[in-house]
């Protein structure tokens, strides 16, 4: 037999079955499951980018955890976590390979490197890629570009979507080990490893650098300034004003409810959750419609539905139009983007429908389907006759908190201003929770700050309970 072989390496469900015999139960990593803050933030960046379903089993061995996720197309995504002393120290996507190499050539470290690389390419921050690969040592070629330029262009083309891959081709060319990667969503790109590189040592160096720049989880945990109230002693929500509710419950927000296998008829579900809205279905999209509040604040939602063997998934429609730097939704509402460049507009507009509809779903069980923005640090200011300030680690937790209190309210949300301050894009929105049974509204002013990658990285909400606004009758 020739010493050159063609081999298809399908590291996938078979290995998962071997590992899962060790332990069969769901594993959704929490903050205490990570060795340091870098790994914790990397994990959540990866989750945010892919909007992945996480409620699937995991298998454990002494050295690693193997877990299945599911992407928005219903495809399984397998991940391996390096595992030491019951803590996650590394993360990578398990990928299929086709390779042409000597049987004796030790390729496993290179495969591990590539799986780390693709995992980071599927996060929402380019910093994780830049921390991991040095284009001066390991050459990248993409779109007729090389090195740093190729890496930056690759990120630009793929920053808004996670990728799935055809089997990666691996072969030897002169003194390089070459990986040819074919994303289903973009042009192929190539990575060249000089064979003189000691890739195992590079991987260890990267890990040490990340650990040095990171915080231990014990130091990274948010500081609790007040003693936690035992859940059994929390007052009933009905007895509390909104300000009192926030004060008592902000450290113990409700959990997100998994509804995918509990909704049989989408129209019935939406009609029950939004009795003040009119519902239209055109065969593809569900359109919830309600008259604007004072012609300035909208409550419409355009939704898509996906059905699979696990049940139903409801998500925000991405339908929109852009003309003369004005963004508009099907309802006719517009957002003026004239203070941004064309490139900036191109980067932010795909995420605007989701941001808008997510807020309009507050106060209903629909929020459990549309909720994102986990782990975005948030400052909440509650204005009554006094001013209380709360630091909340996750904006999703804040929305779940308000969702619980505002059950039965009619919610309006609009982005009223988009501007740049010191080179950063900021949104300003207003959220109104109108009580159909009274003449009161709760009002929230919300400021969204975007980082250089046009991802929301900071949020401030100024909440005015019982604002003196005319409530719209249903």
Image: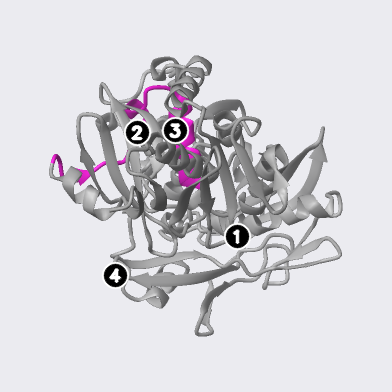
The residue under the point 25% across, 29% down is 63
Find the distance from the CA under tag 3 to the CA under tag 4: 36 Å
- Residue 351, horizontal then vertical, whole percent: 63, 55
Residue 250, numbered label: 3
Which circle's residue, 1 or 2, is located before the other in the chain? 2
* SS at circle 2: loop
Find the distance from the CA under tag 1 to the CA under tag 2: 33 Å
Quarter assignment of residue 378: top right
Which circle's residue, 2 or 4, is located before the other in the chain? 2
- Residue at the disc numbered 1: 186
On-image quarter of the C terminus: bottom right
- Residue at the disc numbered 4: 309
- Residue 389, horizontal then vertical, whole percent: 57, 26
Which circle's residue, 2 or 3, is located before the other in the chain? 2
Nearer to us of marks 3 and 1 is: 1
- Residue at the disc numbered 2: 30
């Amino acid at each position: 037999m020739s010493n050159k072989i063609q081999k298809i390496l399908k590291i996938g469900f078979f290995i998962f079955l071997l590992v899962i015999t060790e332990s069969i139960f769901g594993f959704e990593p929490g903050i205490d499951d990570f060795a340091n803050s870098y790994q914790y933030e990397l994990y959540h960046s990866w989750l945010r980018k892919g909007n992945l379903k996480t409620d699937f089993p995991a298998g454990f061995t002494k050295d690693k955890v193997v877990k299945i996720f599911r992407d928005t197309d219903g495809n399984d995504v397998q991940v391996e976590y390096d595992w030491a002393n019951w803590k996650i120290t590394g993360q990578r996507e398990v990928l299929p390979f086709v390779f042409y190499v000597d049987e004796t050539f030790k390729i496993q470290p290179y495969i591990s490197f590539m799986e780390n690389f693709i995992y980071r390419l599927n996060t929402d921050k380019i910093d994780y890629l830049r921390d991991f690969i040095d284009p001066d040592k390991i050459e990248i070629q993409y779109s007729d570009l090389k090195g740093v330029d190729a890496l930056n262009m690759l990120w630009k083309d793929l920053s808004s979507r996670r990728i799935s891959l055809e089997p990666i081709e691996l072969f030897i060319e002169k003194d390089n080990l070459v990986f040819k990667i074919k994303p289903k969503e973009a042009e192929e790109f190539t990575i060249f490893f000089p064979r003189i590189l000691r890739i195992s040592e590079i991987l260890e160096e990267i890990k040490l650098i990340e650990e040095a720049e990171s915080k231990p989880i014990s130091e990274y945990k948010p500081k609790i300034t007040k003693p936690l109230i035992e859940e059994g002693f929390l007052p009933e929500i009905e007895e509390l004003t909104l300000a009192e509710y926030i004060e008592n419950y902000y450290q113990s927000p409700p959990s997100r409810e998994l509804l995918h296998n509990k909704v049989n008829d989408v129209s019935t579900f939406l009609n029950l959750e939004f009795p003040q809205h009119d519902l239209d279905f055109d065969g593809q999209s569900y359109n919830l419609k309600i008259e604007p509040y004072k012609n300035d604040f909208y409550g419409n939602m355009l939704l898509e539905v996906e059905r699979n063997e696990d049940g139903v998934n409801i998500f925000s429609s991405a339908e929109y139009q852009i003309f003369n730097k004005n963004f508009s939704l099907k309802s006719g509402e517009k957002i003026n983007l004239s203070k941004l460049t064309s490139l900036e507009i191109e980067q932010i507009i795909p995420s605007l429908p989701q941001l808008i509809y997510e807020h309009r779903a507050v106060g209903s069980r629909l929020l459990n389907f549309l909720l994102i923005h986990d782990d975005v640090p948030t400052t909440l200011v509650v204005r009554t006759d006094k001013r209380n300030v709360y630091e909340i680690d996750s904006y999703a937790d804040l929305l779940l908190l308000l969702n619980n209190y505002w059950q039965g309210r009619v919610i309006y949300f609009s982005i009223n201003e988009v501007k740049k301050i010191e080179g950063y894009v900021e949104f300003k929105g207003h959220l109104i929770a109108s009580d159909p049974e009274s003449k009161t509204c709760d009002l929230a002013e919300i400021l969204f700050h975007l980082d250089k990658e046009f991802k929301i990285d900071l949020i401030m909400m100024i909440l005015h309970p019982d604002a003196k606004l005319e409530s719209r009758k249903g």
